[in-house]
Image: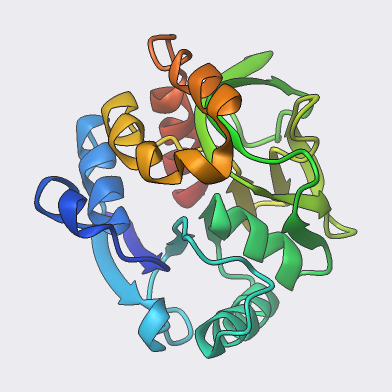
């Protein structure tokens, strides 16, 4: 059984805690729905809890309300851990904020996008298929909820997904890094409960457009299997 370390980089809003617990627990439930139950260890990255060398077989960094550019001690500590773990050739996946801080820490750049918020179900084009991936999908639909984007990939990274709105929607580095801007672990119900509190910042028109996409089919399970395949390489 794979030993998976989930680095939690946020705390859910109080009204969501009883139903969803945490982003880490959402991933645990997601993988269980896919029929796989990794041996999961949770790390509270916000409070400086980070894995030691080779604690686990693979790691996953969750989403967060924070931005990689925020002057918070735990963000710089996490960035340093990413650089060191990468040098040790450990395997790391990232989602949303995790996607951004992986790029930002390894020589790319992430920041607040001039395009504004990306919310709801978005379709991206698959432009590379890693050699280890047993899938020939041409497009992927996932839930998105972000106002920051990866503007520049690390020099040794390959783009995995792109769209007109989000040019670097996913990337990978060899068999060591796999990162997605979208949220395979989110459900339409969760996003519908999360977004109303951000409606004013998002803007009425974009908010409604995003909410209107939530009845579309999604490829979350497919991307979940990609994550599991990557972790077990």
Height in image: 202 above or below 20?
above
In which quadrant of the rendered view does residue 99 lie?
A: bottom right
User: Percent position (x, y) of residue 222?
Assistant: 45, 24
**Front residue of 35 and 145:** 145
Q: Residue at x 64, y 47 (%)?
A: 147
Specify whether 122 is left or right of 215.
right
In the image, residue 226 sits, relative to residue 110, either above or below, namely: above
Residue 197 locus on image (x, y percent)? 37, 45
The residue drawn where x is 66% and y is 73% is 86
**Horizontal placement of 214 versus 120: left or right?**
left
- Judge by depth and name the residue closer to the eye, 73 or 228: 73
Q: In this picture, is 3 found above or below 199?
A: below
Q: Which residue appears at 47% of the width and 20% of the height?
A: 219
Looking at the rendered structure, the number of numbered marks drawn on it comes to 0
Which quadrant does the N terminus fall into? bottom left
Which is nearer the eye, 11 or 170?
A: 11
Indicate how the structure is coloured in the image. rainbow
User: Quarter-wise, where is residue 4 in the image?
Assistant: bottom left
The answer to which of 222 and 134 lies nearer the viewer is 222
Measuring 29% from the left and 57% from the top, which residue is drawn there? 24
Query: Would residue 136 be visible to someone looking at this image?
Result: no
Residue found at the far left of this picture? 18
Kindly tell me whether residue 203 is visible in this rendering. yes
Which residue is outermost to the top?
A: 216
Percent of width and height locating residue 131: 70, 34
Q: Position of residue 125 (x, y in %)?
A: 73, 20
Specify the quadrant of the image occupied by residue 87: bottom right
């Amino acid at each position: 059984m794979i030993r998976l370390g989930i680095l939690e980089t946020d705390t859910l809003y109080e009204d969501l805690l009883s139903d969803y617990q945490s982003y880490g627990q959402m991933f645990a439930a997601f993988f269980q729905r896919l029929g796989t139950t990794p041996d999961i260890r949770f790390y509270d990255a916000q409070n400086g809890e980070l894995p030691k060398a080779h604690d686990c077989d693979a790691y996953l960094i969750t989403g967060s309300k924070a931005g990689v550019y925020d002057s918070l001690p735990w963000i710089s500590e996490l960035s340093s851990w990413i650089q060191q773990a990468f040098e040790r050739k450990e395997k790391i996946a990232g989602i949303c904020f995790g996607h951004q801080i992986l790029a930002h820490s390894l020589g790319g750049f992430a920041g607040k996008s001039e395009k504004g918020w990306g919310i709801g179900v978005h379709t991206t084009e698959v432009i590379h298929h890693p050699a280890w991936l047993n899938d020939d999908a041409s497009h992927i639909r996932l839930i998105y909820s972000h106002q920051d984007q990866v503007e520049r990939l690390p020099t040794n990274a390959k783009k995995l997904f792109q769209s007109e709105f989000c040019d670097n929607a996913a990337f990978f580095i060899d068999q060591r890094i796999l990162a997605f801007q979208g949220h395979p672990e989110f459900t339409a119900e969760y996003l519908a409960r999360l977004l109303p509190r951000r409606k004013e910042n998002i803007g009425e028109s974009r908010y409604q457009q995003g909410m209107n996409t939530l009845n579309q089919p999604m490829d979350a399970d497919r991307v979940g299997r990609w994550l599991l395949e990557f972790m077990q390489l």
